[in-house]
Amino acid sequence: MGKLTSIEELQRLQRGTQAARDPNRLRVRICMTGCRAFGAVEVRDAFQQSVGGNGLAGKVDIVETGCHGFCARAPVAAIDPYGFFYQQISPKDVPIIVQETLGEGRPVERILYQHPQEGRPIPLEKDVPFYREQMKIVLRNCGQIDPTRMEDYLAREGYLGIAKVLSSMKPEEVIDEVVRSGLRGRGGAGFPTGNKWKFARGAKGDEKYVVCNADEGDPGAFMDRAVLEGDPHTVLEGMLIAAYAIGAQHGYIYVRAEYPIAVTHVKKAVDDARALGLLGKNILGTGFDFDVKIKEGAGAFVCGEETALIASIEGRRGMPRTRPPFPAVAGLWGKPTNINNVETFANIPPIIHRGAGWYASLGTEKSKGTKIFALAGKINNTGLVEVPMGITLEKIIFDVGGGIPGGKQFKAAQTGGPSGGCIPASLLNLPIDYDSLTAAGAIMGSGGLIIMDENTCMVDLAKFFLTFTQSESCGRCVPCRLGTKRMLEILQRITEGQGEPADLEMLRELAPMIKDASLCGLGQTAPNPVLTTLNYFLDEYRAHIEEKRCPAGVCKALIRYQIIAEACKGCGVCRKACPQKAIAGRPKEVHTLDQSLCIKCGICYNECKFDAIKII
């Protein structure tokens, strides 16, 4: 593909790539991003070797895709045109797949997903419960295309949005379309995207910037990473449309250096787009100039905040500054700057291509479209999901997520990352949208969704998240720097059995002061896990303080292991496993545990096959 000089040439190229794609051709779509950790490279190599040795060379495409989402079943692959979905594949499974599926069109039942209740195999990807309840807009190409091949993106309506914008829309019309779509920023705050663009468009300045915030720092979150790895061109196209709308000439993608595959794929996408004439000077002969640079961040959580991110790009320490002026007025290098995150930009091309009315028809009245969540924690189907706004928490956890492992009870969900809030089981029917989460004391955040079961200590959980935010605080403002430290010290005392009733009031007093007086969003939201656990799980705090007991059996200082005489078989497994020699007893006789020697490591509890050791 040579450099394009007109919109008509781009449209012809798009039509050509679509026409060249044979929907009936045999294709093996293998996740080659996250699934690499589970042997996807070996599976791919086995497919390439087996296809060549079965007379199918030249008849089958082995497509290395981004994330399919179903991380719990890695490595995964889908077979087109049949739509079969295979999970937990190993290289030894490949020859039978090649013979039975690629050769004969039949599914291999033993590596199909099994229905969790009925135990029957589910051949088709679209029928797997994990996928059936999803609605993919941002993730529409992830798991479908090779992200390193621009032809694959073009064949799936790629760059139709920018072609439409440059050929038939004024910048103000583009902004109006985004406003009418109802799209809100997916980076956490949920500010209306169209309004943000409008401010940047109206700001005075001959030089403006568009910045993509890919500094995804929430523990357990990988939404932005997956989009950049699996479909980088959709982010570039969204940035192009934003740049045209606000009048920007320069762009930056600020991505974590810890995302090597994402960085590689984004660099390739930028180079390919520039070679095709979609980045640079006089794009498609329209007089529109825009180019993109990539900045690799060092992994500071605080750099997810806009002004800290700007400081980092400029080569300064990533620390927030006071606002106003906001970045839309004085941002990068003091110039008007529009900053959106990866998921926000990825929504823009389909909105422009399909229209604001289509997008606004999805979701709820005040939360339009879909949202990506990274499901993690105590849930069967860990992975990446995209669901309509307004879906209930229960539906995500039990229909998409497959419920809680081991038949245990759902206890709470942490939304919005370490600065989010805990939603209890009593709010399972809560619609997942911006306003409902805020009313519950939580936040949408960028999309982390961590599930807890009955064995989770909510006091310990609050301490865990506050430890993270306190250590990631840049230290610039006193409320965040010292306030979170004081709160953390109180939680530490409580989990060590040294808490006092006055500690609860002190936590409730400190939290709002930190939220109100902190300079940036990190400090303003850091107390959320503590506040929500205090609101919904106050009994657990009181048990820690008043009874010196951890109901979940997690806090070491507040638990002890005890051998139940009626259940002990005297097998000696626990005695042999104990590193402190704290367990004694003759074979086939009830054993005893010396509490003075026990270090509460839990090895005996994990090793006992007769459920004879209890945490009390």
Image: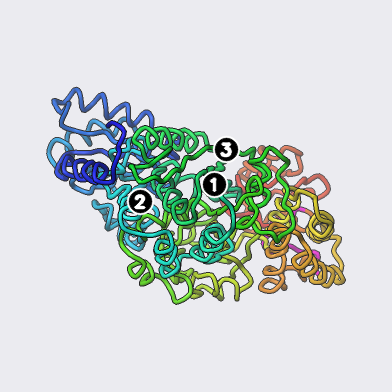
* Residue 191 picture quarter: bottom right
The magenta span reads 546-556
Check residue 575 for magenta coloring: no
Circle on res. 214 = 1
The residue tagged with tag 1: helix, strand or loop? strand
Nearer the observer, 89 or 237: 237
Q: CA distance from mark 3 to mark 2?
A: 24 Å
Q: Nearer the viewer, mark 1 or mark 3?
A: 3
Position of residue 473 measured from the top left corner of the image (x, y, whole percent): 75, 50
Position of residue 510 measured from the top left corner of the image (x, y, whole percent): 82, 67
Could you tell me the amino acid type at mark 2?
A: Ile
Question: Between disc 1 and disc 2, whose residue precedes?
Answer: 2
Residue under label 3, please give it.
295
Check residue 554 for magenta coloring: yes
Asked whether the viewer can see residue 95, the reply is yes
Q: Badge 1, how many Cα within 10 Å: few under 14, some, many 20+? A: many
Q: Quadrant of the C terminus?
A: bottom right
Question: Between disc 3 and disc 2, whose residue precedes?
Answer: 2
Q: Are marks 3 and 2 in contact (CB under 8 Å)?
A: no
Position of residue 438 measured from the top left corner of the image (x, y, whole percent): 60, 72
Q: CA distance from mark 1 to mark 2?
A: 22 Å
Exactly how many numbered labels are in the figure? 3
Q: Are marks 1 and 3 in contact (CB under 8 Å)?
A: no
Q: Main secondary structure of the magenta part?
A: loop
Q: Is residue 238 left or right of residue 466?
A: left
Asked whether the viewer can see residue 604, the reply is no
* Residue 132 picture quarter: bottom left
Q: Is residue 285 left or right of residue 100?
A: right
Could you tell me the amino acid type at mark 3?
A: Lys
Q: Quadrant of the N terminus?
A: top left
